[in-house]
Image (spheres, rainbow, N blue to C red):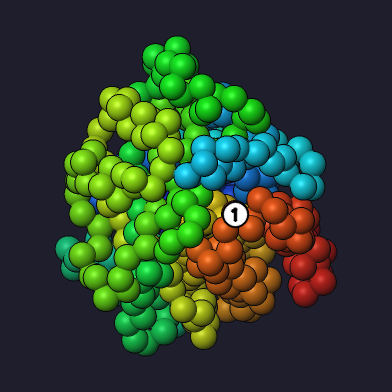
């Protein structure tokens, strides 16, 4: 029988949160032979209907983990068309680093594909997804979590992928760290695109590079629309940002009306852009207050670590929130290969922080700063190189070898 220190024994890993980051980590860790349980508070899990950019830095990780692009029903992201919201004039802006082969998809399509890779047939033991399992406490030093039901689950490693309101973060830090408002909110909606291409008033949306359309409203506080096609070009994802008061704590609300959206942009946009809102809405329109965490003193303690929004909740203006969580899941797969022992965990998690924290904190800060730098991301070669040329798996494998010696 294997002893606790026997290198042939797979790790028992508890992941708290079944979002994009938690599922990516589960895929990477099951492929190493580890036994993964994912604890999700929701009784049913599906990503709220909205689009998502999967840029090449994240896509490298996902393709390594077996992602099927066909299942994402995605649109290629070859560049951007940036419009002046008042004049209506647009300019195509290709990526300065050259073609990137990024994708634009519906968030739920990515979620379903990651869930398939984490819990279905494949390399390594399938992860076990436990829905309706709310975690209320974590003992980071011991590596255990307590569920609302009273059950206590012991593991070799606990990963907090439980989002901006992370309970694992509270237990690692020893205090509650809230994410303050960034000073702006957004409306998110998905529009039916079945007949949109036949509408001459929407020709501006279909002309130019395949990718996002960014509509900037200059000359006043932050106001911007980001629009792109998803689900095999049958749906249009719209994110409409506007400045608000940091003291306004209304937060996210279940639904708002089309009229509330138009009120924020009426008189500020060329009328051709407003025609987009005549299209039928798929589902509901939601308002989100954008929040970002301050830089945390640590992401790790004992046998517990943070990933994604739990560690560095960002504003969505770099389209890298999910990308960082995906990178971090891939990095953990490199740092916890088959043969990792229970006693190795604290040192490996410290290595994870040393490898990932500076990058995560950079994206968090720069994502918020974008609100005061109109469209700077699509104009900055430096930022594009930092974000998109980064090879998570190569960097993580090299880091592992430097610190721990060549993997078996």
Hey, which quadrant is residue 136 in on the image?
A: bottom left
Residue 162: percent from left, percent from top: 38, 62
Q: Residue at x 41, y 26 (%)?
A: 235
As drawn, is 75 to the left or to the right of 177? right
Q: Position of residue 373 (x, y in %)?
A: 58, 63
Disc tally is 1
Residue at the spot 53% in from the left edge and 27% down from the top edge: 204
Mark 1 residue element:
loop
Label 1: few (<14), some (14–19) or many (≥20) C-alpha neighbours in 10 Å: some
Residue under the point 32% across and 25% down: 279
Q: Nearer the viewer, residue 90 or 257?
A: 90
Residue on which disc 1 sits: 375
Out of 114 and 286, give the one closest to the viewer: 286
Q: Locate residue 145, reporting x and y percent.
A: 33, 70
Residue 73 as seen in the image, left or right of residue 99: left
- From this view, report whether residue 380 is shown above or below residue 363: above
Q: Position of residue 303 (x, y in %)?
A: 49, 76
Q: Is residue 39 visible from the viewing direction of this image?
A: no
- Residue 241 visible in the snapshot: yes
Question: As displayed, is residue 151 above or below residue 172?
Answer: above
The residue drawn where x is 64% and y is 28% is 208
**Where on the picture, by quarter, is residue 7?**
bottom right
The quadrant of the picture occupied by the C terminus is bottom right
Q: Nearer the viewer, residue 46 or 226?
A: 226
């Amino acid at each position: 029988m294997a002893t606790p220190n026997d290198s042939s024994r797979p790790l028992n890993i508890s992941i708290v949160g079944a979002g994009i980051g938690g599922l990516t980590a589960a895929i990477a860790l099951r492929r190493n032979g580890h036994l993964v349980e994912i604890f999700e508070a929701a009784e049913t899990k599906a990503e709220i209907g909205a689009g998502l950019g999967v840029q090449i830095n994240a896509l490298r990780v996902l393709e390594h983990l077996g992602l099927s692009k066909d299942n994402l029903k995605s649109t290629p992201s070859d560049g951007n068309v940036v419009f002046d919201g008042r004049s209506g004039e647009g300019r195509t802006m290709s990526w300065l680093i050259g073609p990137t082969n990024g994708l634009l998809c519906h968030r739920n399509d990515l979620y379903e594909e990651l869930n398939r890779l984490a819990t279905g047939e494949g390399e390594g033991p399938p992860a076990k997804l436990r829905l309706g399992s709310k975690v209320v406490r974590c003992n980071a030093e011991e590596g255990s979590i307590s569920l609302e039901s009273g059950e206590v689950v012991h593991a070799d490693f606990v990963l907090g992928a439980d989002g901006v309101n992370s309970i694992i973060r509270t237990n690692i830090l020893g205090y509650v760290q809230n994410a303050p408002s960034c000073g702006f909110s957004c409306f998110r909606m998905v529009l039916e695109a079945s007949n949109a291409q036949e509408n001459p008033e929407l020709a501006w949306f279909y002309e130019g590079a395949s990718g996002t359309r960014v509509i900037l409203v200059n000359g006043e506080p932050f106001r911007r629309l980001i629009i792109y096609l998803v689900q095999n070009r049958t749906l249009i994802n719209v994110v409409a940002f506007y400045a608000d008061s940091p003291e306004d704590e209304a937060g996210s609300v279940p639904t708002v009306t089309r009229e509330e959206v138009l009120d924020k942009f009426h008189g500020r946009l060329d009328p051709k852009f407003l025609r987009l809102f005549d299209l039928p809405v798929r589902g509901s329109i939601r308002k989100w207050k954008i929040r970002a965490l301050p830089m945390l003193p640590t992401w790790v303690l004992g046998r517990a670590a943070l990933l994604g929004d739990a560690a560095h909740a960002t504003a969505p203006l770099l389209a890298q929130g999910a990308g960082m969580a995906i990178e971090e899941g891939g990095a953990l797969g490199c740092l916890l290969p088959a043969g990792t022992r229970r006693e190795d965990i604290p040192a490996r998690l410290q290595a994870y922080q040393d490898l990932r924290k500076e990058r995560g904190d950079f994206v968090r800060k720069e994502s918020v700063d974008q609100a005061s730098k109109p469209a700077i991301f699509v104009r900055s070669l430096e930022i594009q190189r930092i974000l998109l040329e980064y090879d998570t798996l190569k960097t993580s494998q090299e880091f592992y070898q430097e610190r721990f010696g060549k993997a078996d």
